[in-house]
Image (spheres, grey):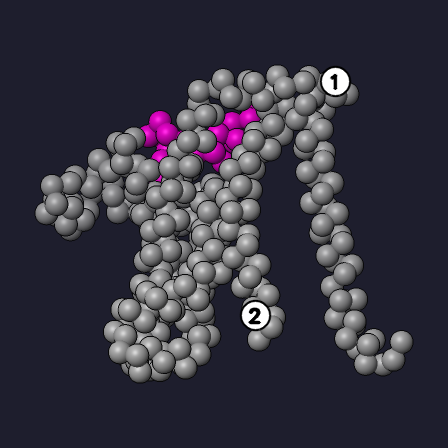
Amino acid sequence: MNKKKIANLAPYGYITPITVILIGFVIVSVIISIVLSFTRYNIMTPPTFYGLKNYERLVTDTKFMKALFNTLKLMVMIVPLQMILSLIVSVFLVSHRHMLIGKIANSVIFIPVLCSNAATGVIWRELLNGKIPAVETFFGLFGIKASMLLGNAKTALAVVAAVAIWKMLGYYVVIYSSGLLGISESFYEAAKVDGASTWKTYWSIVFPIMKPMHATVAVLTALGTWNDVMTPLVMMSGTGKNTLPLAQLNFQTQFGTNYNLAFASYLLALIPIVIFYLVCQKQILNGVVNGAVK
């Protein structure tokens, strides 16, 4: 093997060990979870086969299923709105990137991303506790009482969704902005020659080209929503509503952990998010391949 081939293979040699370790760790963890989810198990006694009874208990558990559907509702609210708003803002920032307003907005919009979910939840909970006259007055203009937004189980989910979108907007704007900046100017020039308006250019040319970016943002947003513990924990405390991560916390008490239901719930929770990823997978892989070709 000549030196050139060795040089080409060297990068793969560097990343192979850590890749094997990570994949092995994930695979082993999943296999252990699958096996234990079909058993009756605690740390004092060896596991015994229990069939599908753990899953039957979860499916018939009203609180767990409500938490699952609440998380699905959050995902349905957050993912499309996050994508649309991030795309609109990124178009504005990219088109004004050489202007002062674009540079300032680009910095300001990223600040919430740097805050922890717990801090974000606390800040918004305090803002909506009804003790700040300016906030109450603002919401009063729309006939809404701010202090009731988190106190009402029907509106609490919507508030959590709005806060989640606000917090991560800057992150996804950066992703979309990088995609927009990566599109060749020749596409815009060709569209201009053909007499296409700015809106037509974006709708018919730019946005379709960014399909891999849309899929990536959708998957990242869905994963973030699905696994978010702190924001719902801080903001929805006392509302009577739970999300999936909060429901799973209930399997661990001061007296121990209900491993049977815990492992079964982890696998049951994987199904929707894995299906969502598989739907978006083709576009994500196309983006990776196209990027590699470039």
Amino acid type of the residue tagged 1 in the rendering: Thr
Seen as rendered, the residue at the extreme right is 1
Q: Residue furthest front?
A: 194
Q: State whether residue 250 appears in this view.
A: yes
- Asked whether residue 117 is drawn in magenta, I would say no
Mark 2 residue element:
helix
Q: Which residue is mark 2?
A: 291
Residue at 75% x, 67% y is 12
* Residue underneath mark 1: 48
Q: Residues within 10 Å of mark 1 (few under 14, many from 20)?
A: few
Residue 243 in magenta? yes
Structural crowding at the residue carrying mark 2, measured as other residues with C-alpha within 10 Å and reported as few (<14), some (14–19) or many (≥20) = few
Of the two numbered discs 2 and 1 on the same chain, state the one appearing first in sequence.
1
Q: As rendered, which of 205 and 99 lies closer to the eye?
A: 205
How far is the residue under mark 2 from the one under mark 1? 49 Å
> Which residue is nearer to you in this view: 264 or 232?
264
Percent position (x, y) of residue 186? 41, 82
Residue at point 50%, 44% (across, down): 276
